[in-house]
Image: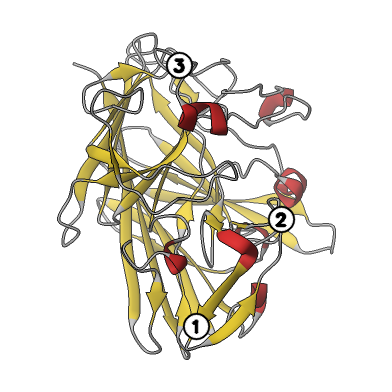
Amino acid sequence: MSIKKHSFGRTSEGEEATLYTLINKKGMSVSLTNYGANIVNIIVPDKDGKYDDVVLGYENVSGYESNSPGYGSFIGRNANRIGGASVVINEKTYTLEKNDGENNLHSGSKSYNKFMYETETFEEEDADSVEFSRLSPHMEQGLPGNLDISVTYTLTDDNELVIEYMAVSDRDTICNLTNHSYFNLNGHASGSILSHKVQLKADSFTPTDAQLIPTGEIRSVEGTPMDFRKLKTIGEDIEADYEPLKQAGGYDHNYVLSISGTEVEKVAELVSDESGRLMEVFTNLPGLQLYTGNFIEGKEEGKKNFVYGKRAGVCFETQFFPDSCHKPEFPSCFLKAGNEYDYVTVYKFGLKK
């Protein structure tokens, strides 16, 4: 295993960004940057042994400074939507930025994907890791508590990208960290992902109102276009006349994972028949947002000057349920002072059998 470092350009404030590339014994590589702790490249072979980059993104740091779609992004302090852009903690109301209509999305316009991080690298015989860490100060993004955070990316020789999220706050707060990478197993510049197949270990999902805030209902996927319990192409039902799909312009929904939560379990699978690539998702978090890139506008250049269009990638955002801070019936994203937030997500790559 080895870790290589390269310049990734300067930010608009003049800070030097670095790209860290991890390469395993099988030739898979993952590139990460200390700007935003973002995933920049994941390069894996297809059925013919051809290597390609399977995540959407940008050529240098300047792209990640705007990055409205959130390519490769480390998201926090609270991923997904908070209704009314406010949260009550210990009977005190904290007002958040309204950056999604009347609601707060991904903690506001400056999520954790737009800060510089301290970096440590670790090289082992069968795995290499990069740890990004920083102190998120009290009232950053409008939320209480000095939150010590770290996200560690580990590439193993089994073609696993392991992401471990850790955080501790000195005050009661909320915490819900995720990664917002967009995957396209035919290669980042290959267009639509509608022919990809998805399987989810989820019997139910959380329907929303018109502003994509969960209503609190947990609805069975049985007999609906939301059912991915068996491998199904993304495009098969995406245009179905079904209110949740019409509200979101496609899939942009939280699935209730059928797992214990006590250990890291397989929760999803993404397959491309065209390339033969397979990606498995493992986590110990209770929810997963399946998002099919419905809001990619096709206006800006990504990597290799390619312009990504609508539904050019699919996200598997492991998480606590959206708006869980207002829904006591949902698993809680509240983090008590001194308690450790520690969750893992794994993206494992291979070839379909």
Q: Earlier in the sequence, mark 2 or mark 3?
A: 2
Residue under numbered circle 1: 89
- In space, the residues marked 1 and 2 are separated at their CA atoms by 21 Å
> Could you say where residue 290 lies in the image, as x and y percent from the top left?
42, 37
The span from disc 2 to disc 3 (Cα, nearest Å) is 29 Å
Viewer-closest of 287 and 15 = 287
Quarter of the image where one finds residue 145: bottom right
Q: Of helix, strand and loop, which one carries label 2?
A: loop
Q: Which residue is mark 2?
A: 99
Image quarter in which the C terminus is found: top left
Q: Which of the 4 image quarters holds residue 206?
A: top left
Q: Picture coordinates of residue 158 (x, y %)?
A: 24, 39
As helix, strand or loop, the secondary structure at mark 1 comes to strand
* Nearest the eye: 239 or 28: 239
Disc 1 residue type?
A: Ile
Q: Earlier in the sequence, mark 1 or mark 3?
A: 1
User: Residue at point 74% right, 61% down?
Assistant: 16
* Residue designated by label 3: 240
Find the distance from the CA under tag 1 to the CA under tag 3: 39 Å
Q: Residue 70's x, y, as percent?
A: 62, 45
Question: Going by the image, does 34 lie left or right of 60?
Answer: left
As drawn, the label of residue 190 is none
Position of residue 180 relative to residue 309, above or below, is: below
CB of mark 1 within 8 Å of CB of mark 3?
A: no
Is 40 in front, or is 168?
168
Query: Do we see residue 183 in this rendering?
Result: no
Figure quadrant of residue 339: bottom left
